[in-house]
Image (cartoon, helix red, strand yellow):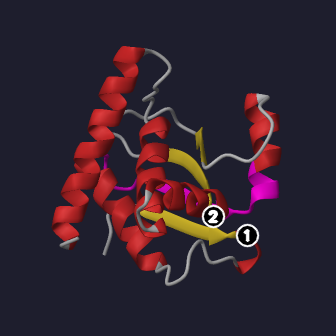
Amino acid sequence: MSDYEIDITCDDGCEPYAGWQPQKTADLADFLLQELKMAAGCDLSIAFIGEEHIAQLHVQWLDEPGATDVMSFPMDELRAGDAQPGSLGDVAICGTVAAKQALEAGHPVSDEVELLLTHGVLHLLGHDHAEPEEHQLMFGLQASLLQKWREREGA
């Protein structure tokens, strides 16, 4: 039983990748919120969406054309370690873009989706990578969290 409310949806009943297990995605989200010391009762929404949908969001919210891999939509502007529960917001992941990136990187799509979810959650908590210092901090934390997760999962 999780201390968090984690909601996972898929556009049109999509499967982000062959063999995808929604519970494993929920377990990773739960792990991330625990590691980031979020208060019990926080909620997070994760949506797997198609290329057309994420391309529309990309233009609407960032004024950038084309599909992207992940987008984050913070709600209550929570930060890691916040003592009060709230809504972190939404992470939208495009499975087809994730699959292309995984192929280019030479690792499983499941690893790419885990990376994108971690990246998206960090953005919800105010992390960014526009400046070199921010990039180093965010990507270092992302790598550390993924390493802990994979050690825990025995991968």
For the point 28% across and 44% down, the residue is: 143
List the single residue furthest toward the bottom: 19
For the point 42% across and 29% down, the residue is: 127
Please provide the residue range marked out in magenta. Answer: 37-54
For the point 38% across and 20% down, the residue is: 134
Q: Is residue 6 left or right of residue 153?
A: right
What amino acid type should be assigned to the residue bearing mark 2?
Answer: Phe
Name the quarter where the C terminus is drawn. bottom left
- Check if residue 18 falls in the magenta segment: no
Q: Secondary structure at mark 1?
A: helix
In the image, is residue 134 above or below residue 42? above
Residue 148 vs residue 73, the one in the foreground: 148
Label at residue 96 = none
Name the quarter where the N terminus is drawn. bottom left
Residue 120 vs residue 73, the one in the foreground: 120
What amino acid type should be assigned to the residue bearing mark 1?
Answer: Asp
Q: Is residue 15 left or right of residue 59?
A: left
Label at residue 11 = 1
Residue 135 vs residue 31, the one in the foreground: 135
For the point 62% across and 64% down, the residue is: 95
> Label 2, on which residue?
48
Q: Are marks 1 and 2 in contact (CB under 8 Å)?
A: yes
- Check if residue 47 falls in the magenta segment: yes
Q: Secondary structure at mark 2?
A: strand
